[in-house]
Amino acid sequence: SRSIDLAVVPGDGIGKEVVAQGLKVLAAVLPQDVKLETREYDLGAQRWHRTGETLPDAELESLKGHDAILLGAIGDPSVPSGVLERGLLLKLRFAFDHFVNLRPSKLFPNTATPLAGRPDIDFVVVREGTEGPYTGNGGSLRTGTEHEVATEVSLNTAYGVERVVRDAYARAAARPRKKLTLVHKNNVLVYAGHMWKNIFDRVGQEYPEVTTDYLHVDAATIFFVTQPERFDVIVTDNLFGDILTDLAAAVTGGIGLAASGNINPTGAFPSMFEPVHGSAPDIAGTGKADPTATILSVALLLRHLGYEAEAVRIEDAVAADLAERTAGTVRTTDEIGDALAVRVAS
Amino acid sequence: SRSIDLAVVPGDGIGKEVVAQGLKVLAAVLPQDVKLETREYDLGAQRWHRTGETLPDAELESLKGHDAILLGAIGDPSVPSGVLERGLLLKLRFAFDHFVNLRPSKLFPNTATPLAGRPDIDFVVVREGTEGPYTGNGGSLRTGTEHEVATEVSLNTAYGVERVVRDAYARAAARPRKKLTLVHKNNVLVYAGHMWKNIFDRVGQEYPEVTTDYLHVDAATIFFVTQPERFDVIVTDNLFGDILTDLAAAVTGGIGLAASGNINPTGAFPSMFEPVHGSAPDIAGTGKADPTATILSVALLLRHLGYEAEAVRIEDAVAADLAERTAGTVRTTDEIGDALAVRVAS
Ligand SMILES: CC(C)[C@H](C(=O)O)[C@@H](O)C(=O)O
Ligand SMILES: CC(C)[C@H](C(=O)O)[C@@H](O)C(=O)O
């Protein structure tokens, strides 16, 4: 019989609330014969305040044993900036070698976009997840003095770039439009940029059916708001991907809907699924958080574990739910979760 | 008697066409008693193809002697990416220590924005221009092999950050709303990010009248499309500024209107003014290029040289010209230049 052994990291703020809805929908969508086991990990701001720990080795080790991780949100203004990001969230992405940070962007019917004319938006950003300016490689000399020098080193390897570029080509080849855009800044970041471009061009020879394109990151932001329909699959570096996917979320109805997967396609370590949004402490506890991004992240999780039909059921349920929403009605976190659980079960 | 000794670098593609209009409007707006001298420098793609040179020492030396530089656009697809950017455009910004890269964004009446609801947009980005990931500090090991490693180093100094942060505070203090937002990514780029934030907070104590705010760069892109009216002055790093100002241009009617100044506020070297857009070789020679961004850059140039009334005359002329445009009429580069020259002269 089949089973899913899931690690759950609710985290901070609205993280707990949206994860509860994600689990509700997961339980509702799974076939009877699939045994779902979950184990909750108490990680995040409260834990750090209590014990000073972000991610102890024993817990990292234990997380390794699960099939996948569902994460809510990490962060609180009471914790110095960087402590939980570097010590927990990024630590997980790096320890489990989540080199494909997958972020689909789709403008669902009947959702608010800040863009006039409601363009047709349906693209996926494949963001590199283990290199670039995110490696924590940098330092500060004469810290706090007028002579301080601070560096941040973007580290890029052919090994790391090629594997994510390959993943992006495979995803592009599997989509109807078969289009892949590389985004970088190779006119300024010439070392990393040229390596990315060369590898992109070389791997592309194995995918003659995929149409390719290159854009500088600054120009890409322009097209995100003026011509987002031109994009199908985008592959890009860790930092550019971070920036572009928030912008993508904004133009497709807000971060309340943006899902993401931190994927290790080799299966050597569990992959981790999380909404793109943060812990939003200002609305925590009010029932205002939209759990849809987390529920869509559960769909990515199911797809990753081989439950394609169930993933599609969730995505279709979200589309139908948004389309049939009554204008002006405000629903609580729980009500949205309930509505989606009912839809996927039927 | 007063005089302006201007270096003109038309550059490539539409660069030549828009610079011609900029000079036309400059000549029209200047009072009779101001002697305008210009010297044209032949730099860019054609020069590089002909001689292999990007910016010879003698010309760099000669450029130093002018009061200011007006630049059109640099770049052509026939030149490998990075050659002219690093060898000419960035070389000028670095050699002349243009540490304030000033980029105003205003949604003029009657212009197209991709944003629904036409929010009230009127902010200025003060982009650091001489540090960060733009220093060319990086390298590639085992280039072209499967073992290649490429690095890009972001260099940040307290000296460099403090001077641009000070400039931004002074600009914010001089504006009616007196609001300054720092944009960085200090939860990931902790060394550079914390230095920026500490200096930002420290200098802020000298400007109690300025309201301050901090945003991560990813979150800033969201607000650029959902709530751009919240911004007044933004100060940020070289790369984040590059990305944000293209996005800002897109939401305020396109890069046909976005002006910029590469300013050395000390006056030790000439400052350089240029449209944010590139050389657009696809429309070069067609008369389709909008010279407004260059003409607004001329306004920044005049303001920098102390001709405030003339700068305002140009900005008012652009606002009036855009407001009174007849919908549907397409004007050539030359016609827009003529119309603005007439307006500023009267
Ligand atoms: C919280 C932060 C470290 C993270 C990132 O920069 O990757 C977030 O912005 C994201 O996009 O998942
Ligand atoms: C052409 C390029 C080097 C330049 C930059 O990245 O600064 C351009 O994008 C700009 O914004 O002026």
Image (cartoon, coloured by chain):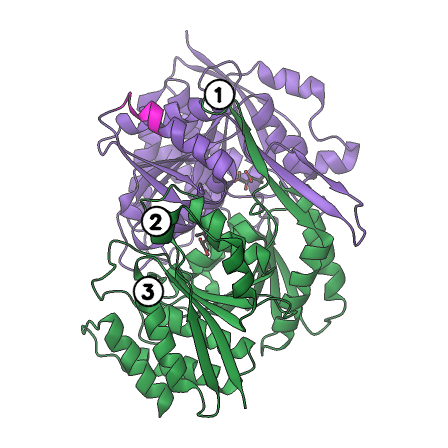
Chain colours: A green, B purple
Q: Quadrant of the N terminus of chain B?
A: top left
Chain letter of the residue beneath label 3 in the structure image = A
Q: Is residue B128 left or right of residue A10?
A: right
Is circle 3 on the same chain as circle 1? no
Residue closest to the eye, B210 or A52 = A52
- The region drawn magenta spans B201-207
Q: Which residue is mark 2?
A: A50
The residue tagged 3 is A16
Seen at 53% across and 50% down, the residue is A239
Instruction: Look at the numbered disc 1 and give the secondary structure of its residue.
Output: helix
Select label 2 or label 3 by which is in front. Answer: 2
Residue A9 pos. (x, y %): 42, 64
Is residue B133 depicted above or below A158 in this figure? above
* Amino acid type at mark 3: Lys
Q: Which amino acid does the dot numbered 1 rest on? A: Tyr
Q: Are marks 2 and 3 in contact (CB under 8 Å)?
A: no
- Quarter placement of the C terminus of chain B: top left
Instruction: Determine whether A15 is above or below A308 in the image.
Output: above
Q: Is residue B203 magenta?
A: yes
Q: Residue at x 76, y 60 (%)?
A: A202
Determine whether the residue tagged by mark 3 lies in a helix, strand or loop.
helix
Residue B240 placed where, x, y %? Answer: 48, 41
* Residue at image mark 1: B159
CA separation, marks 2 and 3?
A: 18 Å
A8 sits to left or right of B59: left
Distance CA(mark 1)–CA(mark 2) = 38 Å
* Circle 2 chain: A
Q: In the figure, B66 relative to A281: above or below?
A: above
List the single residue furthest toward the top.
B1
